[in-house]
Image (spheres, rainbow, N blue to C red):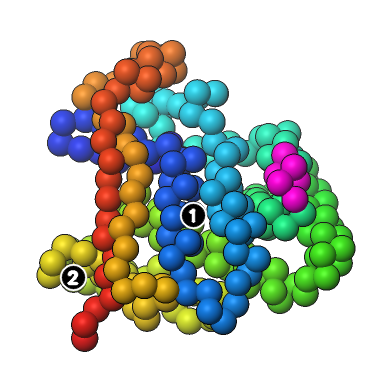
Amino acid sequence: MIVNLQTDGWEIIYHRAHALLAAQIAGYWDFSKKTYRLYETIAAIAHHDHLEKEWEGNELTEAGAPLDFTLDKESPIDKLKQHADEALYQGRWVAMLISMHLCFLNQAKGEEDPEMANFLKEQRQRQAQWQAELGVTQEDAEKAYTFMRWCDRMSLILSQRQIPAAGRQLEITKGPDGKQYNVHELDSGDLCVTPWPFSCDKFTVMVDASYLSQLQFKSNEELTKALMEAPRKTLAWTLRKSDD
């Protein structure tokens, strides 16, 4: 879960909803020069966080607050393997990108955990095999994954409400073209990405959020029940190309 503290409780955005937001952003990219297997890549972006299942396992901090994903350091190998294996049902391209994402997220843990190191080695071998079978160069695979990670990062910036005030620039990350991208708020309240990478001059993306007024919970079951009954609303952001 993505957990944002509010003055009257918690704002919760599920990880799979954040992934769908990332896929919306991806759909507006300017693909006139390179497609990166557009539809399969967007499918991978939309499903890259299906490992996160908010109803399973511990979802509370020690203080009883909803557990934000940044505080959850658990990455069971069996669940990572399952996520990588299930991605293959959508095809090798999707599986390759999901596998690359799992390696990116867990690369630091591989330096300390032999079991994780073996998992990462196995995944990189599978990636190489799929690239060979699909006739894809490692460079093109890396560009596609860089695009996926860019969209993921942009979605997290929105979902975690990280846009700075007063029009200050926030670095997103480098795109598949190697350029560095930033985002800032315009005087109108719309957002602008520079340089502008999208196919149209203005568009809106949305995500569902749930709201909890209760600050602490005694158990995961209590939190789960509260989330199922929580009111929801749609959050929307309009991105617009600057006139400057």
Q: Amino acid at mark 1?
A: Ala
Residue at figure coordinates x 26%, y 36% from the top left: 233
Q: Main secondary structure of the magenta part?
A: helix
Circles 2, 1 touching at the beta carbon (< 8 Å):
no
Callout 2 secondary element: loop
Q: Which residue carries the number 2 mark? A: 186
Quadrant containing the C terminus is bottom left
In the rendered structure, does residue 112 fall within the stretch colored magenta?
no
**Magenta highlight range:** 86-91
The quadrant in which the N terminus is found is top left
The answer to whether residue 82 of the structure is visible from this angle is yes
Q: Is residue 211 above or below residue 224?
A: below
Classify residue 129 by image quadrant. Answer: bottom right
Residue 135 location, x and y as percent? 83, 70
Q: Does residue 178 sit above or below 238 in this rendering?
A: below
Determine the image quadrant of residue 56. Answer: top right
